[in-house]
Amino acid sequence: MARDLLIVGLNHRTTPVALREQLAFPETALGAALGQLKSVPGVHEAAIISTCNRIEVVACIAGEPADVGGGIEVFLAREREVERSAFATTSTCTTGGTPSATSSASLRAWTRWWSASRRSSAR
C-alpha cells in the first residue's frame, strides 16, 4: 500500500497566539501524545513539532489525506482539550500541494528526512 507524508499544522500566520498556546505540547507530554497519535486510523509514523510559532503533525499515512487529516485534528482537540471548531478553519493540511509556504517548506524538509531515514534503515 502506498504511503504519503501529510502535515496538519497551525502557524503564526493562520492562528492567534492564544490558540497556539492552548494547542502547544509541553515536552513532557510529547511521548504519550505520539503514542496516541499513532492510533489515529491511517497514521503509521508521526512526529509533532510544537514551537512558539507553530504546531505541526507530520505523519506517514495510508488512506485519504482528508480523512486522516480530520482524524489528526480530532486527536489535537482531544489531547489539548480544545474544541476542534476553534482551530479547524485555521489549520492547514498538506500532502504536497502548497496551501501555505510554511507547510510546504516543512513538507519538503520532512520529505528529505523521511527519505534519508528510509534509505538508512533499509541497509
Image: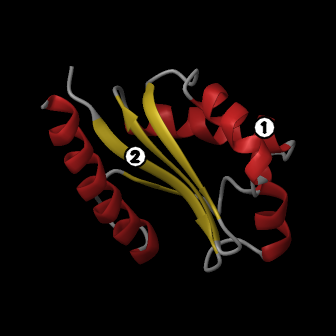
Q: Position of residue 52 (x, y in %)?
A: 71, 73
Q: Return the residue found at the far bottom.
A: 13
The residue singled out by tag 1 in the image is 79
Seen at 84% across and 58% down, the residue is 22
- Left or right: residue 58 versus residue 17 is left
Q: Return the residue found at the far front.
A: 123
Element at badge 1?
A: helix
Q: Is residue 15 above or below residue 77?
A: below
Seen at 34% across and 56% down, the residue is 110
Q: Position of residue 73 (x, y in %)?
A: 64, 42
Seen at 33% across and 44% down, the residue is 5
Of 100 and 51, nearer the camera is: 51
Seen at 34% across and 26% down, the residue is 62
Tell me the tag on residue 89. none
The residue singled out by tag 2 in the image is 6
Task: Please state, as top left, top right, bottom left or bottom right, where the N terminus lies in the image.
Answer: top left
Of 61 and 83, nearer the camera is: 61
Q: Is residue 49 above or below residue 84?
A: below
**Residues packed near mark 2 inside 10 Å, few (<14), some (14 to 19) or many (20 plus):** many
Q: Are marks 2 and 1 in contact (CB under 8 Å)?
A: no
